[in-house]
Amino acid sequence: MTRLSLAVRVAAILALAALAGAEDYDLLVRDARVVDGTGAPWRRADVAVRGDTIVAVAARIKGSAKRVVLAGNRVVAPGFIDLHTHARQGIFQSPAADNYVRQGVTTLVEGPDGSSALPLGPFLDRVEALGPGVNFASLVGHGSIREAVLGRADRAPAAAELARMQELVRQAMREGAFGLSTGLFYVPGSFARTEEVVALARVAGELGGIHTSHMRDEAARVLDSVSETIAIGEEGQLPTQVTHHKMIGRAAWGRSAESLRLVQQARERGVDVTIDQYPYTASSTALQAALLPSWALEGGAEALRSRLADPAARARILEVVKDKIQNERGGGDPRNIAIAACGFDHALEGRTLADILEGRGLPATVEIAAVLALEIVERGGASGIFHAISDEDVERILVSPYTMIASDGEIPGFGQGAPHPRSYGTFARVLAVYVREKGLLTLEEAIRKMTSLPAARLGLGDRGLVRPGMKADLVVLDPATVRDRATFDRPHQYAEGVSLVVVNGQVVFDGERMTGARPGRVLRGPAFILPAPVQR
Ligand SMILES: [Zn+2]
């Protein structure tokens, strides 16, 4: 046989082998510390992936793979599941969701705080058609449903209106929602009484959904709010969750001891209540939601304008704003409130109310800051960052076995504005600060809070664990170096220490770069009904 014919034959064999899929696996991660997501201690093993599925987890797996990753001393864990994100716009602008992927996140859940796309089905179809880099799921928002039926009216629904709202919950569940989110802090959710929420939660629960709440109050009446969230689960007969649990303002500091006791007691009597949290001592939301009374927002922007034009109403609103800067989200000092994004004046972004006042030659008192805050709201509004949470509460809530990690973040335009660093840092920060530096959690427990716990919450039976048969959403990271780099001053910085991220078996982040692959799927909830097949 000539050398040429041998080469031809070898090439032919290789080509045939490739056609037949002769490699045993598509991806093989060798010699990893496997943190499997259950909370069990890591064990040294190889992880083999074929197609979109983990097919083997064992020591020294034999066989070949299209791609072999030598994990060395690094950890392989299930991809992180973030069940509180505001990614509705961002997923279309940055479908790869780099800020999340670089922390190891492989599934985003949208529709939190009572606010979701409505109708949900067409929105999820659009995300599916887009082809995101990560898996994408959604809740249906109570506030969105209420607004569709009642507008921004501060009243209870009539029987027929309530029935219509229930029908919208049912429809969204059938279209793939994982449950009902409420934002009883925000207009118009704040106008709903508990009974209304229970009536809607029952529908979600009957269809296998959960309830998760941005509670009515996270400051002076936070314990009442935790009780209300528990009551919604108990009377609505469905799993219920206190989302982004925190204690806002000095007067509420320390009360997490009591809120956790309420959760514990509820669980002991059989109420399925859990918590999620982001690991920062500042929150972020719209300035007007954080500082204005909700009665001032009834009826929408036009109604607010006319109230502010009335001197008596304006004075009453101003009193509330002062009180909230003094005792709630302002933590008693205008230095604690920074502008995150401001459409009418980008120059304000990243500056605190105190800073803006001093720039105008004014003293940074609470009174004058309240006037400035109203001025910003009147000129078109802004989102803010509010430093008014204590480390002690963050830590106490974090170590509760019922607490999972969720960012409450978004997919920001890279470099735009001064958003809360949670969008870039949440998961890496838990691993760096609370596992490695403070030693408050084991690595395995922290990862459980990012994987199997949220997966179980959502009823995702095939994600959240490194185990044969599960979908291959994986992250490889170095527990000695993983860290968040995003700060309040410089938020647009990616996390470090994650070296590989796999979504449905495909590599989306490879050490230093995003690969461009977009293997994410839209995940549909427990009551999803496939459209009827076309009859021939
Ligand atoms: Zn929220």
Image (spheres, rainbow, N blue to C red):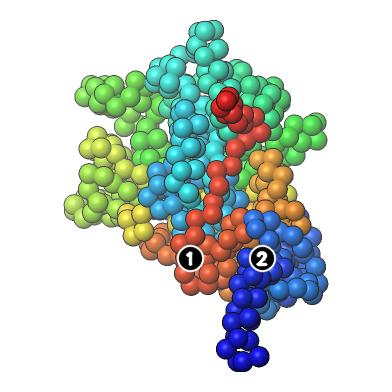
Q: Where is residue 60, by image quadrant?
A: bottom right
Q: Which mark is residue 21?
A: 2
Q: Give amino acid for label 1.
A: Thr
Q: Quadrant of residue 448?
A: bottom right
Q: Which residue occupies the foreground of this view, 339 or 93?
A: 93
Q: Which quadrant holds residue 366?
A: top left
Height in image: 477 above or below 272?
below
Residue at x 55% of width, y 43% of height = 522
Q: Residue furthest left?
A: 360
Establish if 442 lies above or below 244.
below
Q: Disc 2 marks which amino acid?
A: Gly
Q: Which residue is mark 1?
A: 515
Q: Which tag is nearer the camera, tag 1 or tag 2?
A: 2
The image shows residue 419, relative to residue 139, as above or below, that is: below
Residue 534 versus residue 12: which sits nearer the camera? 12
Give whichever of 372, 85 is nearer the camera.
85
In x, y percent, where is residue 92? 40, 47
Instruction: Using the numbered discs, state the Cα–Cα distance from disc 1 to disc 2 in whole angstroms.
Output: 23 Å
Q: Is residue 484 visible?
A: no
Taking the view exactly as shown, the residue that stands out farthest to the front is 1
Q: Is mark 1 within 8 Å of ligand 1?
A: no
Badge 2 density bin: few <14, some 14–19, many ≥20, Cα 10 Å: few
Q: Quadrant of the N terminus?
A: bottom right
As drawn, is 216 to the left or to the right of 319?
Answer: right
Q: Where the C terminus falls, by quadrant? A: top right
| Percent coordinates x, y for residue 24 in the rendering | 72, 68
